Amino acid sequence: MPLLMPVILGSVRSDRQGVKAARFITRSLESRGCEAPVVDPLELNLPLLDRMYKEYHKGEAPEVLERLAELFRRADAFVVVSGEYNHGIPPGLSNTLDHFLEEYFWRPSAIVCYSGGRFGGVRAAMQLRAMLCELGTPSIPSLLPIPEIGTALTVDGDPEMPWLDKAASRFVDELVWYAEALRRQRTGGTPY
């Protein structure tokens, strides 16, 4: 059974560059035989967080939250694609992630970060790493930072920098290792 790794896109801006990074990492995951559906907050159009999914009575959550909860419960890992807004996490990403909690438990996450400059979004990734851990989906040790995303990837997510394919391959190898290990552990039960 292939690993299921939703790719959670972080931006809702009209000229967002993260779509290119999401396309790039999705292809990298699929080339390894993983299922990698993109979770796009712009398409979801979630309201600002008022109630988490778990705070609704059974069957009363909005349909969009029900669909996401079902996808997240089946997931083996999560890939989060994040830009860097004022050295922090994009609000659309935080809002999407915050709607859930138990659905993330005992599954690893991985961070693909990007920026228009040379730092590749790593300042936001450090904050995101703490947030993901608190949500119960700790991030793997490696990051996949993409600096100068405006020229690093084409609109279709094809790499313009020769190092990107190699970096993505190692990143996916690591994520697959963690996802397979935790999948095996979940089959035997979890601490709670």
Image (cartoon, rainbow, N blue to C red):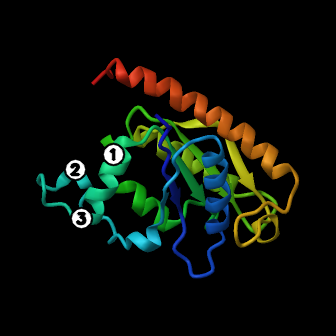
Q: Residue furthest right?
A: 162
Does residue 23 sit above or below 6 in this rendering? below
In terms of sequence position, does the residue under pointer 3 or pointer 2 come before the other? 2
Q: Secondary structure at mark 2?
A: helix
Q: Nearer the viewer, residue 169 or 81?
A: 169
Residue 63: give its label. 3
Q: Residue at x 76, y 70 (%)?
A: 154
Q: Which residue is mark 1?
A: 101
Where is residue 110? Give x, y as percent: 58, 43
Give the spatial CA distance, label 1 vs label 3: 17 Å
Q: Nearer the viewer, residue 134 or 192?
A: 192
Q: Amino acid at mark 1?
A: Leu
Residue at 66% in and 40% down: 172
Q: Secondary structure at mark 1?
A: loop
Q: Report whether 133 appears left or right of 16.
A: left
Nearest to the eye among marks 1 and 3: give it: 3
Residues at marks 1 and 2, CA–CA distance in whole angstroms: 8 Å
